[in-house]
Every structure is written in C-alpha cells, then in structure tokens.
Amino acid sequence: MSRAGALLPDRHPTADFFVCDIFDALPKDDLGSMEHPMFSLSTRPDRRILQYSHNGVEITVTPSVRGLATIHDKDILIFCISQLMAALNAGRAVSQVLHLKAHDLLVASNRETSGDGYKRLREAFERLAGTRITTNIATGETETTRGFGLIENWEIVRRSRGGRMISVSVKLSDWLYRAVLANSVLTLNRDYFRLRKPLERRVYELARKHCGRQPEWRISVETLLKKSGSASPRRVFRKMIRDMIAADHLPDYEMTEEPGDIICFSRRGQVIESTDRPILFPEILEQARDLAPGWDVYALEADWLAYWAASGRPVLKNAGKAFLGYVTRRIAG
C-alpha cells in the first residue's frame, strides 16, 4: 500500500490557503499530552474513567455525559496552540481566550466544511469542555496536582442565517496556556491531520515526542500500549501495530519490529551517524530559532544533514555558518 493512498485526501488544495494566513502557523502540540494519554482512541462515545500512572506521573481522565474527548477532538487544541505560538513568535500579545473562525479551524485540520463538519466541530467543543483531567504533570517547570477541563469554556460568537457557527471564542485551561507560554510544544507534520485511525495519530505523537534528535527510539509493545491509551488487549494491539508497520504511512517515521517484542522508530531519510558528521552547538540552534521563528530547528537540522549527506559529505570549515546559511535560504524560498 502506498503512503499517499493510506492517508486521508488533502481536502483543501494549497491554492485555497491564500485566502487567509492560518497556514503561517505551523501545527504545534503540547508536550504533556504527547507524552501521556489524555484522549480517547474510540470512535464511539467513551464514558470510561481513565487512570494512568507512569514514572511518577498520575492522570485521571473523567468524561462528561457526552463521553471522553477524542484524539480527533484534539485538532482544536492543536489549532489553538499553533495560533498562540505564531503570535508569540511574531511578538504579538496573546491571551488565554482565542477568537477563531470555524471555517479556518476546519480547513487547517483537513476536515470537511459541510454542514456535518460544523456539527461534528460543535460536538468536539462539548466533549473538550466536559472532559476533566486530574494530573500532577509539570508545565512550565511548575508541578501541581489539580483538575481542569481541556478547555475551560467555549462560545459561539456569530452564526450564519442557517444557524451554523461562523466564529467561536475558546478559553484554554490554565495548564495548557502555561505550557504554551513556556514553549513546551513541538511542531507536527501537516500530514498528521490526514491520518485516518486514532491509534495512528497517537503513535505519531509518541514518536515525534520521543525520537526528537535521536536517530532511533525503541519501546516495548507493553509500554507502547500503556502510553498510547489504547483499550485493546495486548494481542490485538500488537496486531494493529504490525498493520501500521506494513502500511508504512506514518509521517516522518519508519517503524520496525525487533526481537523481544520491541518496536523501533527511526526518522525517514535520516543521516546515519558517523565520525565525520557535522556538529552544531546549542548557540547555533538558538541563532537558527531567531532566524526562523515558528520553525522546528531540529527538523531543519535533520533536513540539512540529509542535504549534506546527499552532497557527498563534504568537509565543512564552519558547520554552524553553513547551517545558518541553509536556514536562511529555506525560509526565503
């Protein structure tokens, strides 16, 4: 199966994006919910109380009568985080309350803009506001144990004549807003919104969070099951992971199964580590952040290393200067 064929269609051609600036904001996700399971992977109303404990982190997720917020509902939070980070990187003032255009949110998350799409969007807001989290996860180096909603509240500000929401205001939880202000976020591949299955999205989040700058990341099937939040038995979960490996359409990462019930994640097209690999010091990466606000400097570094390898691995007198020149060209082109 081809990777393109396994993904949802790109519902909004690139030409349409010129009507608004929402795609100036790269998709961003908060580290806390990438690391730990807070969203249901079910496609049906899920009214379980979820309990999770791992390495000192305790999480309880309690549903409303509408059920738990789902991994697809999280698109709303990703959109909000992305808008806030774009504003911060541009030096604009931000607030815990965001005013959003419903159409922009649907387009940015690759959702249908039909009447049914707006109906599902409203249901997602209701689940996000109703789901309650109790956790001791630290955000912005502050650890507290408290309960909160994934969003504190939301309100339809303007409707069309047919009653469809046009604009909406959302107040993020203190916990999530603090994570954004502390820059505790990572950039996602836009193809994340084209992943069909909830487990695919969750596994991509975990790979994105844990691979980071590492060439590879290994995890046992048992721990992956736990961190994913899947309710499937281990045998069924292992089969779903093997199906994902066979399909091979996870953005950015390849998955392989290794002896000992281990799953290995590696970055697609990564440069193999070698003694002649250019080394970039932290201050160079900081300069790259200043040059390219809103960009993921580690992704830029990986792309540059791939470019360097494809060029025949030339000896660089000044790797930092070469990298910053590459970044300048990338953001200009």
Image (cartoon, grey):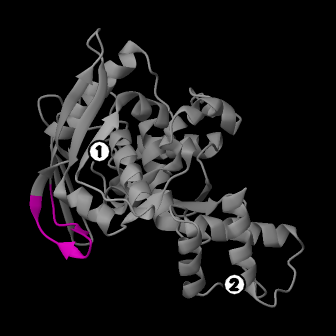
| Residue under the image location 44 percent in, 21 percent down | 113
Pick whichever, 25 or 76, lies toward us. 25
Q: Which mark is residue 320?
A: 2
Q: Position of residue 294 (x, y in %)?
A: 50, 61
When the figure is inspected, residue 204 is found, relative to residue 286, above or below; the finding is above
Q: Position of residue 97 (x, y in %)?
A: 22, 47
Q: Is residue 213 visible?
A: no
Q: Residues within 10 Å of mark 2 (few under 14, many from 20)?
A: many
Q: Which mark is in front, 1 or 2?
A: 2
Query: Which quarter of the picture shows residue 63?
Result: top left
Q: Which mark is residue 260?
A: none
Highlighted range, magenta: 134-146
Q: Residues within 10 Å of mark 1 (few under 14, many from 20)?
A: many
When the figure is inspected, residue 260 is found, relative to residue 131, above or below; the finding is below
Residue 286 lies left or right of residue 58; in this view the side is right
| Residue under the image location 26 percent in, 26 percent down | 122
User: In the image, what residue type sits under mark 2?
Assistant: Gly
Query: Which quarter of the picture shows residue 166?
Result: top left
- Residue 8 sits inside the magenta stretch: no
Residue 272 lies left or right of residue 74; in this view the side is right
Secondary structure of the residue carrying numbered label 1: loop
First of labels 1, 2 by sequence position: 1
Q: Is residue 183 visible?
A: yes
When the figure is inspected, residue 316 is found, relative to residue 223, above or below; the finding is below
User: In the image, what residue type sits under mark 1?
Assistant: Phe
Measure the alpha-carbon separation of dots 1 and 2. Answer: 40 Å
Q: Which mark is residue 39?
A: 1
Q: Quadrant of the N terminus?
A: top right
| Residue under the image location 25 percent in, 54 percent down | 95
